[in-house]
Amino acid sequence: DIVMTQSPASLAVSPGERATINCTSGPSVSTSNIKNYVAWYQQKPGQPPKLLIYWASMRESGVPARFSGSGSGPHFTLTISSLQAEDVAVYYCQQYYTTPRTFGPGTTVEIK
Amino acid sequence: EVQLLETGGGLVQPGGSLRLSCAASGFNFEANAMSWVRQAPGKGLEWVSGITNTGETTFYADSVKGRFTISRDNSRNTIYLQMNRLGVEDTAIYYCAKEAGATNGWHDYWGRGILVTVSS
């Protein structure tokens, strides 16, 4: 199975500051034609996950522009450029390159 | 508007069975693969099972293979998860998730989830 790891496990960021979450796949979930099979989800307490990013960098419709994804090969990043109070949540990366689809363990983002 | 509504959860004894249903609306159901994803209390997300748009191919996590069966009825816009030989480790919120494609994609819509509790 492909293992997705995330770092840090949690982070606290001041409002308006940048939050960066890292995700690494093992083995790679990228193809030679540079397709990166990684999605990012946001989960707020008591709610189902919500899709933010797919193909590692494509923002889902309706997702604020402060959320961006980047990376290739085994290393991927989710960046929240200017943290808002409503962004407090757990963030998960996931690979959909193959089954079983695997998620990272999650990163908890809090307000400092 | 895409809607996914899970039903069929509840309390079951270890070794028992339960069947979850997920009724879908608001999109062309037969065009999309579907999945079940679960979340144990206070834990992260675990993909459980998936099924292609036609239902011809199914996939399972090792943790449920041989005990769970996923199926779909495209005439009813519904997927199912038959869960047998349940153990306490299967206690979780089970989410139904739509995939953004016929066979292999990210989960673009999720249901609210249904709680399954396995306990004596």
Image: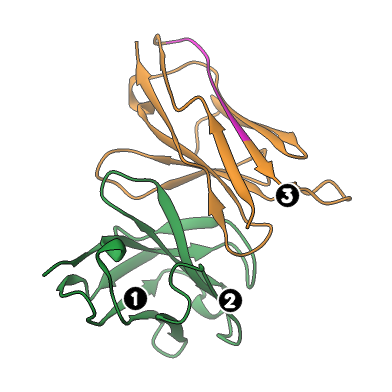
Chain colours: A orange, B green
Q: Which residue is mark 2?
A: B31
Task: Say what amino acid the circle numbered 3 marks.
Answer: Val
The residues colored magenta run A16-23
Q: Which residue is mark 1?
A: B23
Work out whether disc 2 and disc 1 sit on a shared chain: yes
Q: What's the residue at 32%, 38% (across, down)? A: A44
Alpha carbon separation for disc pair 3 and 2? 25 Å
Task: Say what amino acid the circle numbered 1 marks.
Answer: Ala
Report if residue B39 lies within the magenta region: no
Number of the front mark, 1 or 3: 3
Residue A87 tag number: none
Instruction: Give the SS element for disc 1.
Output: strand
Measured as percent of width and height from the top left, residue B90 is found at: 30, 65
Task: Say what amino acid the circle numbered 2 marks.
Answer: Ala
Judge the density around disc 3: few (<14), some (14-19), many (≥20) Cα neighbours within 10 Å.
Answer: many
Can see residue A101? yes
Q: Earlier in the sequence, mark 2 or mark 1?
A: 1
Judge the density around disc 1: few (<14), some (14-19), many (≥20) Cα neighbours within 10 Å.
Answer: some
Q: Which residue is mark 3?
A: A29
The reply to whether dot 3 and dot 2 touch (C-beta < 8 Å) is no
Q: What's the residue at 43%, 72% (across, down)? A: B64
Alpha carbon separation for disc pair 1 and 3? 31 Å
Alpha carbon separation for disc pair 2 and 1? 15 Å
Q: Is residue A37 above or below residue B21?
A: above
Q: Quadrant of the C terminus of chain B?
A: bottom left
A112 lies left or right of A40? left
Nearest to the observer: residue B80 or residue A1:
A1
Measured as percent of width and height from the top left, residue B53 is found at: 57, 79
Q: Is residue B113 above or below residue B74?
A: above
